[in-house]
């Protein structure tokens, strides 16, 4: 007993102070790729190399449309290798969580040449904007959930890569409990569902039941390329694709798997998304929003 | 091996049609018909061979038959022996071996489900891979399109074996569990606290992985291999790359072989440390888990320095590795290992300091060596129950033939010994990594790109941290695949959990399950 105490005291605090202080990233860490659309002479090699179809090229009527979906990207860096003109560059950006799925998709349109190459850029959407979570969101959690947010994690078909990093949120280094956030054993105790995917055919019903068993107001966070879009598995006879094909999603966290700080960023973003009105109104707000989406979901099928 | 092959030919002249030695390191024996029973029995009972994997392939569109493959190995012989038994499309049935050799029980049922070939005489021919309410489809047949839309899932209809008696009842658990783990269903029949028996239902995370391989170019398929079981991303990736390299005759440069070895061992250490912590956690020794989680972060940081990914993704490639290391990265291995070794020693001391923990782990969840051997149990679980197997030693790959290491084997088969195997292996892995760094050759880190010839079949085998991983591939036209069979060690080991649970109390299920730590995704694919 004394030895254990001595060891723990000699270590002191192991906890990293993210998001107050940016994490110390090693120079080799690969975050998301960044695209200089104006300088990109040919997107086809990158699209061919991309294992998940995050980069897609489609030609029609003398124009080429290139889309880049961060909701499919696994940060492998193959697009950078394949693009000889330096227009694709891997960055160390990992805080990519977004409340709107469309914020994760970039599009560029080029004039197409007869030889298959493309010329000047006609239009491009900008990088998704990311809010700094930090103190504002911490305040929002404290306000809304009384310093206590309960998360139920649901693996709806993942490869278990995301689970590894979610487990790491609970270790002393990332220590998610310092935000008053903890993982609970039952959806009936949860405020948030943290769902990994792709959602398999065999897990669809379990996911729906888990969602229904979670009392409102509730927040759903889709984790990883597979949770957002189906990732490398996509949609097939056994996979329904991303989590939002089955239940409404409030925040999407890209990555394969998202590093613990990226998960934390997304979870905090999900909480910050809740407007700072009085508690009664908030409750109605959220349930209304989820209800209308749920109705849409049911009638849409 | 050649003399061994001659002997088989002489002994079974009617059954053996031809022997294919085109690809190095493996003999493929084409049989005359679907019945492999006699040769398999001879190999297993008289020649000490072991059945590593059984799987099928649909060649109806080309050759008018399905094939069943039986992959064997023998102690002291690194060559693979593969029996290839044709099953005619018009009579899709093959004799089952499961009654005699229970290790193939699930694998034969998988063939039934995915290919619609009947394992005649199987003692329990119910579905295993497709749940009971799936329509009558066989997804790995070539005429079944990947994007087939099936009717919506309406809940599992599996009928569990009932338990009756005073005070006897069932406890259904899952597929959504209490912890941060993968989905599966467990049905416990209990009499008070002790468990009478446990029934399992897996394949909740089946996501068409093997079918997807047939639809991806090989250079992209490496990333799919990394997503078979996320905790073994590098091991599965390496097994896949080795299969392709063997098929195409690609010589992987020595530097890359050593780099792969170092990364494989890092994956092993990182997972063993988290398992050790989780085992402690499940018997209430939370402080040990906290230290293990902290120490694991040290290793994940090193993984990131070496590959750009904390979980070693995007590094392994056909012909080597994607990125070379600078001197600073190599030095980081040694300096991190130095800190890690001190931390690891302290961690082991913490584990050993608690008598109450020892009492919870000892004689809990015993898997007897005889049972382990019959069920074909592999990996850490096998080595804790007397099954002395390790592909690193028995089928050397990467740089293992140049490096000394010991394979720890225990007979007791309880949770404590599964923990001890892990602790011993961490020690061995540290020595392996240090030796590999000391011998790390200069030179290229990747063989030049190479067109991959079609129609080649090959095995790739890696001893992942959990146990033996086998990929078998057939290459197709245009750098694509015709088939990729994936075997994760979990598939063999799940039925053994049932044995280990009997007579234990239900409160010990989490720690027993954790001491096995099997991959649901690797099983379900």
Image (cartoon, coloured by chain):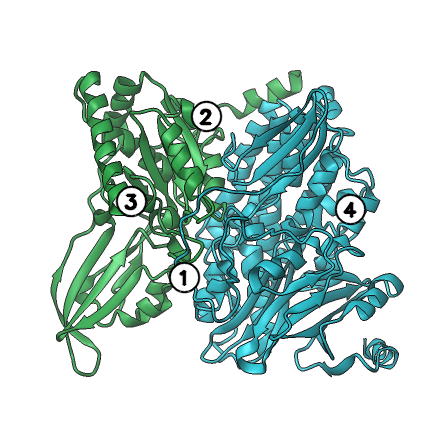
Chain colours: A green, B cyan
Q: Are marks 3 and 2 on the same chain?
A: yes
Q: Are marks 1 and 2 in contact (CB under 8 Å)?
A: no
Residue at x 82% of width, y 69% of height: B38
**Gap between marks 3 and 2, in whole Å?**
26 Å
Q: Which mark identifies residue B372?
A: 4
Q: Is any part of residue B250 visible from this angle?
A: no
x, y percent for residue A27: 39, 50
Reading the image, the residue beneath label 2 is A184
Q: Are marks 1 and 3 on the same chain?
A: no
The first of marks 3 and 2 along the sequence is 3
Q: Which mark identifies residue A96?
A: 3
Residue at x 39% of width, y 28% of height: A213
Q: Are marks 4 and 1 on the same chain?
A: yes
Q: Callout 2 environment at 10 Å: few (<14), some (14 to 19), or many (20+)?
A: some
Regarding mark 2 in the picture, which secondary structure is present there? loop
Q: Are marks 1 and 2 on the same chain?
A: no
**Gap between marks 1 and 2, in whole Å?**
37 Å
x, y percent for residue B409: 79, 46
- The chain holding disc 4 is B
Which of the 4 quarters of the picture holds residue A253?
top left
Regarding mark 4 in the picture, which secondary structure is present there? helix
- The chain holding disc 3 is A
Q: Is any part of residue B23 visible from this angle?
A: yes
Reading the image, the residue beneath label 1 is B148
Regarding mark 1 in the picture, which secondary structure is present there? loop
Residue at x 64% of width, y 73% of height: B91
**Gap between marks 4 and 3, in whole Å?**
46 Å
Vertical side of B502 occupied by B237: above or below: below
Front residue of B136/B466: it is B136
């Amino acid at each position: 007993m004394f030895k254990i105490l001595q060891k723990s005291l000699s270590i002191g605090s192991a906890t990293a102070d993210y998001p107050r202080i940016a994490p110390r990233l090693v120079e080799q860490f690969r975050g998301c790729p960044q695209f200089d659309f104006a300088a990109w002479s040919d997107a086809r090699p990158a699209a061919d190399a991309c294992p998940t179809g995050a980069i897609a090229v489609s030609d029609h009527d003398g124009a080429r449309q290139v889309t880049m979906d961060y909701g499919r990207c696994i940060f492998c860096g193959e697009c950078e290798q394949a693009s000889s003109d330096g227009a694709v560059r891997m960055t160390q950006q990992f805080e990519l969580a977004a409340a709107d799925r469309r914020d994760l998709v970039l599009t560029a349109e080029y004039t197409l040449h007869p030889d298959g190459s493309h010329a000047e850029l006609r239009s491009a959407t900008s990088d998704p904007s990311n809010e700094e979570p930090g103190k504002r969101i911490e305040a929002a959690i404290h306000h809304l959930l009384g310093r206590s947010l309960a998360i139920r994690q649901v693996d709806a078909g993942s490869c278990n890569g995301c689970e590894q990093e979610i487990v790491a949120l609970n270790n002393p280094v990332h220590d998610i409990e310092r935000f008053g956030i903890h993982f609970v054993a039952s959806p009936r105790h949860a405020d948030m569902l943290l769902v990994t995917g792709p959602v398999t055919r065999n897990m669809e019903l379990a996911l729906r039941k888990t969602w229904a068993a979670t009392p409102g107001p509730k927040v759903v966070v889709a984790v990883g390329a597979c949770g957002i879009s189906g990732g490398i598995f996509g949609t097939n006879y056994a996979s329904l694709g991303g989590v939002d094909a089955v239940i409404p999603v409030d925040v999407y966290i890209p990555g394969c798997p998202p590093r613990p700080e990226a998960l934390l960023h997304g979870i905090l973003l999900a909480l910050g998304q809740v407007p700072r009105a009085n508690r009664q109104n908030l409750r109605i707000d959220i349930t209304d929003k989820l209800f209308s989406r749920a109705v849409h979901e049911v009638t849409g099928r | 091996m050649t003399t061994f092959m001659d002997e088989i030919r002489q002994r079974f002249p009617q059954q053996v049609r031809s022997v294919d030695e085109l690809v190095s390191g493996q003999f493929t024996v084409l049989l005359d018909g679907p019945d492999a029973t006699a040769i398999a029995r001879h190999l297993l009972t008289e020649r000490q061979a072991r059945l590593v994997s059984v799987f099928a392939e649909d060649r109806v569109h080309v050759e008018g038959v399905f094939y069943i493959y039986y992959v064997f190995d023998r102690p002291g012989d690194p060559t693979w022996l593969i029996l290839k038994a044709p099953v005619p499309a018009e009579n899709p049935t093959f004799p089952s071996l499961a009654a005699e050799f229970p290790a193939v029980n699930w694998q034969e049922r998988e063939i039934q489900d995915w290919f619609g070939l009947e394992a005649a005489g199987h003692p329990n021919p119910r579905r295993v891979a497709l749940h009971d309410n799936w329509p009558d489809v066989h997804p790995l047949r070539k005429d079944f399109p990947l994007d087939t839309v099936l009717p919506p899932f309406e809940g599992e209809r599996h009928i569990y074996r009932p338990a009756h008696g005073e005070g006897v009842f069932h406890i259904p658990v899952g597929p959504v569990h209490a912890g941060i783990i993968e989905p599966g269903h467990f049905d416990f029949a209990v009499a008070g606290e002790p468990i009478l028996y446990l029934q399992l239902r897996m394949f909740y995370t089946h996501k068409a992985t093997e079918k997807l391989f047939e639809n991806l170019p090989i250079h992209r398929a490496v990333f799919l291999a990394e997503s078979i079981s996320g905790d073994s991303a590098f091991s599965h990736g390496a097994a896949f790359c080795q299969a392709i390299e063997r098929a195409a005759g690609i010589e992987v440069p020595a530097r890359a072989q050593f780099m792969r070895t170092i990364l494989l061992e890092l994956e092993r250490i990182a997972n063993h440390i988290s398992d050790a912590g989780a085992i402690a956690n499940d018997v209430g020794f939370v402080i040990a888990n906290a230290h293990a989680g902290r120490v694991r972060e040290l290793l994940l940081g090193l993984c990131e320095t070496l590959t750009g990914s904390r979980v070693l993704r995007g590094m392994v490639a056909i012909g080597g590795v994607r990125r070379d290391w600078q001197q600073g990265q190599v030095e980081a291995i040694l300096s991190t290992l130095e800190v890690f070794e001190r931390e690891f020693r302290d961690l082991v001391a913490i584990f050993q300091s608690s008598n109450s923990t020892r009492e919870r782990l000892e004689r809990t969840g015993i898997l007897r060596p005889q049972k382990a051997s019959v069920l074909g149990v592999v990996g850490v679980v096998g080595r804790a129950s007397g099954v002395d197997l390790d592909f690193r030693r028995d089928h050397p790959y990467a740089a293992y033939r140049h490096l000394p290491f010991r394979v720890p084997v225990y007979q007791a088969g309880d949770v404590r010994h599964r923990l001890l195997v892990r602790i011993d292996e961490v020690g061995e892995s540290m020595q392996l990594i240090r030796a590999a760094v000391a011998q790390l050759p200069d030179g290229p880190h990747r063989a030049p790109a190479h067109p991959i010839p079609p129609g080649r079949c090959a095995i790739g085998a890696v001893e992942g941290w959990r146990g033996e991983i086998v990929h078998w591939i057939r290459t197709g036209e245009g750098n694509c695949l015709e088939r990729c069979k994936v075997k994760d060690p979990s598939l063999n080991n799940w039925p053994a959990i049932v044995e280990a649970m009997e007579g234990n109390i239900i409160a010990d299920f989490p720690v027993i399950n954790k001491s096995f730590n099997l991959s649901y995704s690797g099983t379900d694919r």
